[in-house]
Image (cartoon, rainbow, N blue to C red):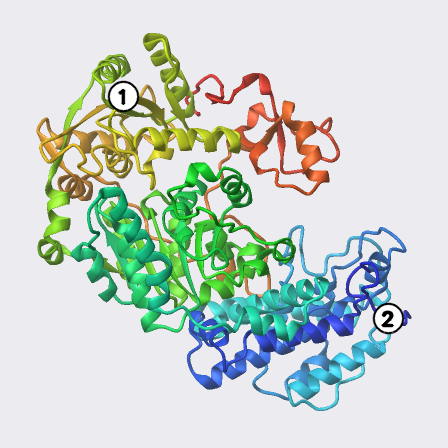
Amino acid sequence: MPKILLAKSKRGDLEISVQRHLMETGQSAQQIFRLDRRWGLNWCRFFKIYAPAKQEIFLLNLIVAALFHDIGKANEDFYEAVSGQNRITQTLRHEHISALLLHLPEIRRWLSANPNLDLDVICGAVLSHHIKASYGGDWEWGKTRNKKVLRLYLQHPEVIAILEHIAKVANLPSPPVLPSSPWAEKPPWTTAWQQGRNSSVRFGREIRNNLDRCALLLAVKAGVMVSDAASSGLVREGHLIDKWIDDVVHTVEVTDQDIKNAILDPRAEQISKTKGKPFEFQSFQTKASELGNRALLLAACGAGKTLAAWKWAEAQAKAYKIGKVIFLYPTKGTATEGFRDYVGWAPEAEATLLHGASRYELDSMMKNPDESATTAIKNKDFRLSEAEERLFALGLWSRRYFSATVDQFLSFMEHSYSSLCLLPVLADSAVIIDEIHSFDRRMFDNLTKFLDRFDVPVLCMTATLPPTRQKQLIEKGLRVYPNEIEREEFKDLSEKEKHPRYQHQSLSDQAIALSKAITAYKEGKRVLWVVNTVARCQKIASALEKELSQEVLIYHSRYRLKDRQACHTSTVNAFQQREKPVIAVTTQVCEMSLDLDADVLISEVAPASSLIQRFGRANRHLARGLDFRAQLYTYLPEHHAPYIKEEIQSGLEFIKSLGLGEVSQAFMAEMLEKYALSEPFADESARFLDSGYFATPGNLREIDDFAQTSVLDSDLTQLQQKLIEKQSTDELIISVPKKYSDKSDSRPSWLPKYLGIAPASQYCPRFGFQVEEKNSD
């Protein structure tokens, strides 16, 4: 039996024993979620554990689970793996052993001495804390991967000391003596395993109906993961646990005055300078502060929803004791724009941009300060320090204002580990979720489940939303704002929405559209052409360049990040001026939060909600005067992909309803209610909510079966060097159709498994990755 049971591999002189790690995880749980501080109380509110007595029960179960979660590391395979003796496939995962111990009769009798301990909740939290446990399949609980006998060290002094500490914490009698026999496929281990499987089925049925017990399970499950991450990361980086938690977690709340000073006032001052006149909030923006903690803000494109949202957040900070404001967007690009325009006004130590490529985006902002000289981020460095980056999600706990993608915070619903580590931040926040019209079915279902099961202030926003989706959000407690009566009261908003901004004309085909685009451009107008596929975007851009004998702007999703960033910036900048003609061809990427303001907009027929978003990129700010009308042209695409036929048909009917006269955004919203396709309601299931004892990762979004995250073959050497130097590789990553991405055995051994290799011969920095169009494109 080893003298010391190692919980981690040694790092230099740092040697962490199982006993130390379990004690420190229990300590982290106690300190992070203490019930006399804001984080602990907001965590309980988030999970709808309101009664003080039940909150105490939560904290007790969390601490016991935290003290027990890695006790299964007391086995010979794990010791050999972390001590460097052998690289072996472990017979059983250590958390699977921990859960088996919890189903030994002597352990269950012992823990049952305290009626406030929920043994199934503790077992579920212990078994699932690495998100690699299931009833069957690859991560089947108790499934052996090596030998048939495994030596356990359950009589080790460290194990005995932990059990004695649990007895003290939970007011239990002296702990029982654990079996001295090795694990094998025979009693008592097979008996414990079978009883555990039976309990998991019974418990799974119960929590479907007993939401209070399910809430306790979820709060403890996530709490163990957070506490484990904190204890591991803080000790590894040399932090004192109590001091770091006190300094970073238990800070003063964000006040309404803080939000006013950090975001609203500087943003208002910038708008005033840009427009050359004093800034005034619109009435609907000011009244947003009276909405309460759950609302759906529906207002036209360019109406000023984002400022209204920050006024709402200001009010939430007055009504609740919160420490964060989180603004969530559907894409990386929109999150970056939200950061540039709003969150970036906050002090650099308080604000952050968070998405899959945010490190690269922030690096670019710092390296090119001239590009942002008039924006919020001038002379600021929002990047995490090296020490904060080594703490991963924990390094973000100190920030107060977030501009992030939905995935970063709501993927906990599908067992994303990093999202779960950010869950205390989410529970301590007011949350704004923008552009919800763009959510795919799976994302929207997860949103409705989130709203239903968790108590946190939430404001959802979009310009348009089909009636079926509106109804689902209303049923989850969101108040639609402004309603019909309020719209009449808000003259400034009503006038914007009812003002005839557009003149619409249907075209017979793409060839006529090409002629219209060329004529408008030669007349000095800003022309935006939106199509449904990347291949047609590239094809039309090529045709325009041939006719005009000059380059046009192209923007879609199939670029390396560094090239997409350049396309994004040039496209946005081109439409912010009104003196020169512009022509750009884009895909759906233009629909969300991009401040494009075209004089002429051409679009393929798409779903009605998408068309309204596209039209919102024309005459967006009424900058050419109230008499100006943007020209809208629409035509049927060659085929319906990537949409279904019914969506294109509904879009066609919506377009016919617009007629040939002048069109306002209010009229389009009215027609959307008539022609949008209805959707079935969510089934109210999500992995985090339904997994009971178990946990395996899923996807927040619908999986794109046709795309593969890749690197160009010409970038392999540069990618390898960046990996060696531990630099961000985001700028080199590209998404391409799967059939063009090589994932064969000939790929370099150092290349991450999730990356394919795409041929650079089909890539152009301006046009992106080029393929022939197919109906499935």
Amino acid carrying label 1: it is Pro
Residue at 20 percent across and 19 percent down: it is 507
The residue beneath circle 2 is: 4
Q: Where is residue 185 drawn, in percent x and y? A: 80, 63
The quarter of the picture where residue 513 lies is: top left
Q: Where is residue 634 drawn, in percent x and y? A: 23, 24
Q: Which mark is residue 753?
A: none
Q: Where is residue 48 drawn, in percent x and y? A: 42, 73
Observer-side mark, 1 or 2, equals 1
The quarter of the picture where residue 244 lies is: bottom right
Alpha carbon separation for disc pair 1 and 2:
73 Å
In this view of the protein, which residue sits in the foreground, 149 or 311?
Answer: 311
In the rendered structure, the answer to whether residue 448 lies left or right of residue 603 reads right
When the figure is inspected, residue 37 is found, relative to residue 456, above or below; the finding is below
The residue beneath circle 1 is: 581
Mark 1 neighbour density, 10 Å: few (under 14) some (14–19) many (20 or more): some
In the rendered structure, the answer to whether residue 251 lies left or right of residue 100 reads left
